[in-house]
Image (cartoon, helix red, strand yellow):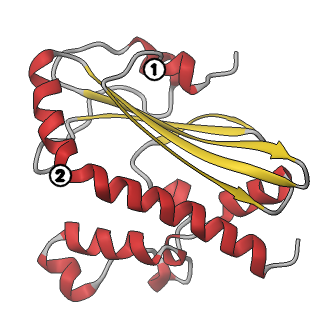
């Protein structure tokens, strides 16, 4: 069974979508997406530093680089891979209390699409995001969509307030990801 955004979260409270055309075939764009490193995302690192508080203001964001390995972006994100159909789509998902000072997660197997799809306990936000690659001529449209569904009205109200503050940063991160992949494709041989 292929788990898509539409199957995992067909209805949602919040949604954002971003896309960019990249001058390379989907296979090449896929490789760069899968290999993208946190250290390649200047805007994202800046936002993470601001959000991380005083410790990250002084010490910076831990990208794993001190261990000789800059973390892959898809490995560093809170949403975990739920499904992949290379080189067409990868779908990530997470369930959390995002409005809490330290987001908690329920006792549900992370990365399990079946458990994610059926989870409906009150007090949580379910988030899915994807990266979809669509061939167009000699290039690829790379798009990312994020959907959020809150499991009850009180959580929906709290998340709406949270989203009011976080949405601009979320969009900046998505644009940073798309820009970085386009840059990698343009500067590396394939």
Q: Which residue is mark 1?
A: 9
Residue 144 vertical position relative to residue 46 in the rendered view, above or below = above
C-alpha separation, residue under disc 2 versus residue under disc 1: 23 Å
Question: Residue 113 at x, y = what percent?
Answer: 52, 23
Q: Which residue is mark 2?
A: 165
Residue 189: tell me if it is visible: yes
- Is the Cβ of the residue at disc 2 closer than 8 Å to that at disc 1? no
| Image quarter of residue 130 | top right
Residue 103: tell me if it is visible: no
Question: On the rendered structure, is 12 left or right of 81?
Answer: left
The C terminus lies in which quarter of the figure?
Answer: bottom right
From the viewer's side, name the closer residue of 65 and 92: 92
Report the residue at 33% width, 76% height from top.
46
For the residue carrying disc 2, how many other residues have a C-alpha within 10 Å: few (<14), some (14-19), or many (20+)?
few
Question: Residue 164 at x, y = what percent?
Answer: 18, 45
Report the residue at 84% width, 61% height from top.
24
Residue 157 vertical position relative to residue 39 in the rendered view, above or below = above
Question: Residue 62 at x, y = what percent?
Answer: 36, 75
């Amino acid at each position: 069974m292929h788990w898509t955004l539409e199957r995992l979260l067909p209805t949602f409270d919040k949604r954002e979508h971003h896309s960019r055309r990249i001058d390379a075939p989907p296979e090449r764009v896929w490789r760069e997406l899968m290999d993208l490193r946190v250290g390649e995302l200047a805007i994202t690192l800046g936002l993470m530093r601001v959000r991380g508080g005083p410790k990250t203001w002084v010490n910076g964001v831990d990208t794993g680089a001190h261990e000789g390995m800059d973390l892959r972006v898809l490995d560093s994100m809170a949403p975990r891979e739920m499904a992949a159909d290379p080189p067409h789509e990868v779908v990530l998902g997470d369930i959390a209390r995002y409005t809490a000072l330290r987001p908690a997660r329920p006792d549900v197997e992370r990365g399990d699409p079946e458990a994610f799809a059926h989870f409906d306990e009150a007090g949580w936000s379910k988030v899915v995001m994807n990266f979809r690659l669509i061939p167009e001529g000699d290039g690829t449209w790379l798009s990312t969509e994020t959907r959020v569904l809150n499991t009850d009205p009180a959580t929906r109200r709290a998340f709406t307030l949270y989203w009011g503050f976080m949405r601009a940063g979320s969009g900046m991160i998505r644009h940073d990801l798309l820009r970085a992949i386009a840059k990698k494709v343009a500067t590396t041989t394939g």
